[in-house]
Image (tube, grey):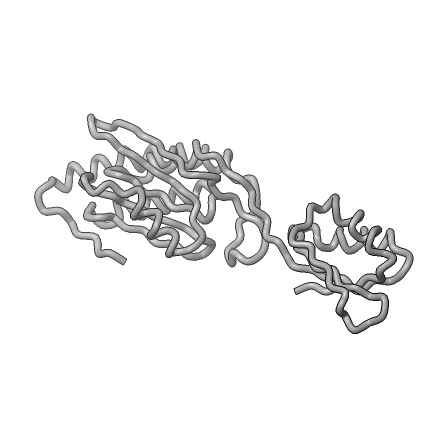
Amino acid sequence: MPTAITPAAPSYLRYQKLHHRISASLFVLAAGAKRAMSTGNSSSSGNAGAYTTVKERVTFEREIKKSKFIAIAGPISDERSALSFLSQVRDPRATHNCWAYKVGDQYRSNDDGEPSGTAGKPIHSAIVSSGIDRVMVVVIRAYGGVASECLRNAPTCLVKSKVPMGVEVPFDLLGILYHQLQPFQVEDIKLDYDTGKDGISMVTFKVDFDQAEKLEEAVKANCSRELEFFKH
């Protein structure tokens, strides 16, 4: 992690006053963001469950005391994609490019030369308050308040993890099985006839984690014979 360096020239009092103004706006904006964006359960592991993230890159600008602040938020999947996002959006001409990101329980932040704890930490706090996961916010010459506003205006989507499933099914019941799979919008359907069992095939697919049990119940209820399901 890059080391935050306290600038020698600017007055600390000026930074402190600016931090107080933005911290006050952060409290109000983060509260609104939390109400607007908390549309699903976040996943700390990233491997199961659902989480809310931003759909696309979004930019928010604000002018405070004749200084222009720009916050850019975007979806990420891990540290590597976060650093890639940072390299794409950072402005080398700007005085500071402060940032923070969160992926489940993992997070990092950086003050980029601002007084320690006055930039990266408020941005991370804004992300946590918004209820949005797998997101990075880069703030050019600004702190948490503008980060909260950026996230509050970002279009989001609820992402559900897919779980792989398989079922052994007789050839004559394949039509019934496929009919039952359609309402659950399963993905990656594959059919294997080479199971070593006469007249039996293996159908594998992926389904939303919270629909797996319902799908199994629906298939069993509409097939005349007992079917064996496999979950990975």
Q: Position of residue 207 (x, y in %)?
A: 67, 52
User: Residue sitting at 74 percent across and 44 percent down?
Assistant: 183
Residue positioned most to the right: 224
In which quadrant of the rendered image does the C terminus lie? bottom right
Q: Position of residue 190 (x, y in %)?
A: 69, 58
Q: Nearer the viewer, residue 115 or 84?
A: 84
In which quadrant of the rendered image does the N terminus lie? bottom left
User: Residue sitting at 38 percent across and 56 percent down?
Assistant: 79
Q: Position of residue 137 (x, y in %)?
A: 36, 43
* Number of disc labels: 0
Q: Nearer the viewer, residue 81 or 9?
A: 81
User: Residue sitting at 45 percent across and 40 percent down?
Assistant: 130
Left or right: 94 in relation to 121: left
Tell me: residue 145, above or below residue 222. above
Tell me: residue 166, above or below residue 41. below
Which quadrant would residue 56 be assigned to in this image? top left
Q: Nearer the viewer, residue 86 or 36?
A: 86
Residue positioned most to the bottom: 196
Left or right: 113 in relation to 57: left
Q: Nearer the viewer, residue 34 or 106?
A: 106
Q: Position of residue 30 (x, y in %)?
A: 41, 37
